Image (cartoon, rainbow, N blue to C red):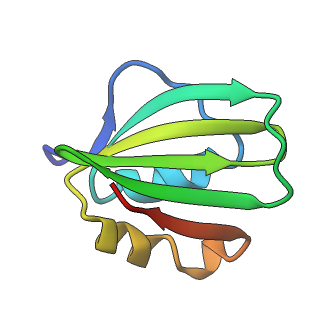
Amino acid sequence: MAKGRGRAGSHTSLTDAARPVAEALERYGRVSRGVISARVRASTLSIKVMKLGGGLRITVVSKGSRQELHVYGLTAERVGQLLTGPDFSGYKLNFADE
């Protein structure tokens, strides 16, 4: 695997909704799998992209859970391009201001 791509950290758990998002982003940048919150009320699948110093925080929300991913080496624009494909047609994509 090329340096600067793939998975960062040792946390390996992914929710079913976050798995395709993480796998798509790991092909082009580094992804650190973050906190999973349970008992989240949501009617649709959604992805929120927020710029952080040195990276991005991607929050994936499904009917019962929310998971944060931290992404390095990709811009918000590039993440938007990657997550607007047909594999993610069921997700609502949001970009948050800092």
- Does residue 37 appear to the left or right of 69 in the view shown? right
- Does residue 40 appear to the left or right of 35 in the view shown? right
Residue 56 in the image: state x and y as whole percent: 32, 50
Depth check, front residue: 41 or 80: 41
Residue 9: quarter of image: top left
> Looking at the image, which residue is at 42% across and 73% down?
80
- Residue 82 visible, this angle: yes
- Does residue 50 appear to the left or right of 47 in the view shown? left
> Looking at the image, which residue is at 83% across and 29% down?
39
Depth check, front residue: 61 or 24: 61
- Considering every residue shown, the one lying at the far front of the view is 98
The vertical placement of 74 against 16, above or below, is below
Which image quarter is the N terminus in? Answer: top left
- Residue 30 visible, this angle: no
The vertical placement of 27 against 86, above or below, is above
> Looking at the image, which residue is at 46% across and 49% down?
58
Residue 85 in the image: state x and y as whole percent: 54, 80
Depth check, front residue: 16 or 68: 68
Residue 22 in the image: state x and y as whole percent: 49, 48
> Looking at the image, which residue is at 25% across and 64% down?
75
The vertical placement of 39 against 91, above or below, is above
Residue 86: quarter of image: bottom right
